Amino acid sequence: MNIAFIAHDRKKDEMVNFVTAYEHVFEGHTLYSTGTTGTRIMEQTKLSIHRFMSGPLGGDQQIGALVAQNEMDLIIFLRDPLMAQPHEPDIIALLRLCDVQGIPVATNVATGELLVRALQRGDFAWRELVHKYKPGEN
Ligand SMILES: O=C(CO)COP(=O)(O)O
């Protein structure tokens, strides 16, 4: 599965702890992140992550481009609900695209845990069908 990690600054420690706890699950997948989030995770784990640009510089939009093509299977996006972000429109656009494509997205660790456990159980198998039967590609 293609999984993306994104965390706002005050949520980065929480993200690192979360990903560390489930490193054994994530290591079998293809991982993406915004710039700084990925750097922080890779400093603390053995995971290899494809890092896009930092969020304020367009990283959310780069991940959004994969979502628009229905190529992202799961997004863990730990947003800071208590601080305004300069790139708020990019964030809203990314979440909107997740709803357009029906992509599972967790915006807090509690939901993230549920989705990761579902991933472990094989509940994301339907996404393989999405990849297999993309419009115009089958
Ligand atoms: O701002 C972000 C998401 O909106 C995260 O970007 P960084 O991972 O580069 O800090």
Image: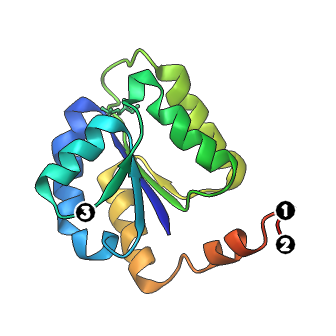
Q: For the residue carrying disc 2, how many other residues have a C-alpha within 10 Å: few (<14), some (14-19), or many (20+)?
A: few
Q: Amino acid at mark 3?
A: Leu
Q: Furthest-bottom residue in view?
A: 121
Mark-to-mark CA distance, 2 and 1: 7 Å
Q: Secondary structure at mark 2?
A: loop
Label 3 CB less than 8 angstroms from ligand 1:
no
Q: What residue sits 61% from the left and 49% below the top?
A: 67
In the rendered image, residue 62, in percent from the top left (x then y), is placed at 53, 37
Query: Residue 138 has which mark?
Result: 2
Residue identifier under label 3:
47
Residue identifier under label 1:
135
Q: What residue sits 38% from the left and 51% below the top?
A: 50
In the rendered image, residue 56, in percent from the top left (x then y), is placed at 40, 22
Asked if residue 98 can be seen in this view, the reply is no
Q: Amino acid at mark 2?
A: Asn
Q: Earlier in the sequence, mark 1 or mark 3?
A: 3
Q: Amino acid at mark 1?
A: Pro
In the rendered image, residue 70, in percent from the top left (x then y), is placed at 67, 56
132 in relation to 4, above or below: below
132 in relation to 91, above or below: below
Mark-to-mark CA distance, 3 and 2: 32 Å
Q: For the residue carrying disc 1, how many other residues have a C-alpha within 10 Å: few (<14), some (14-19), or many (20+)?
A: few
137 in relation to 55, above or below: below
71 in relation to 26, above or below: above
**Left or right: 36, with 31 as reference point:** left
Task: Point out the quarter of the image occupied by ligand 1.
Answer: top left
Q: Furthest-left residue in view?
A: 44
Mark-to-mark CA distance, 1 and 3: 32 Å
Q: In the rendered structure, are the residues bearing label 2 and label 1 in contact, judged by CB atoms less than 8 Å apart?
A: yes
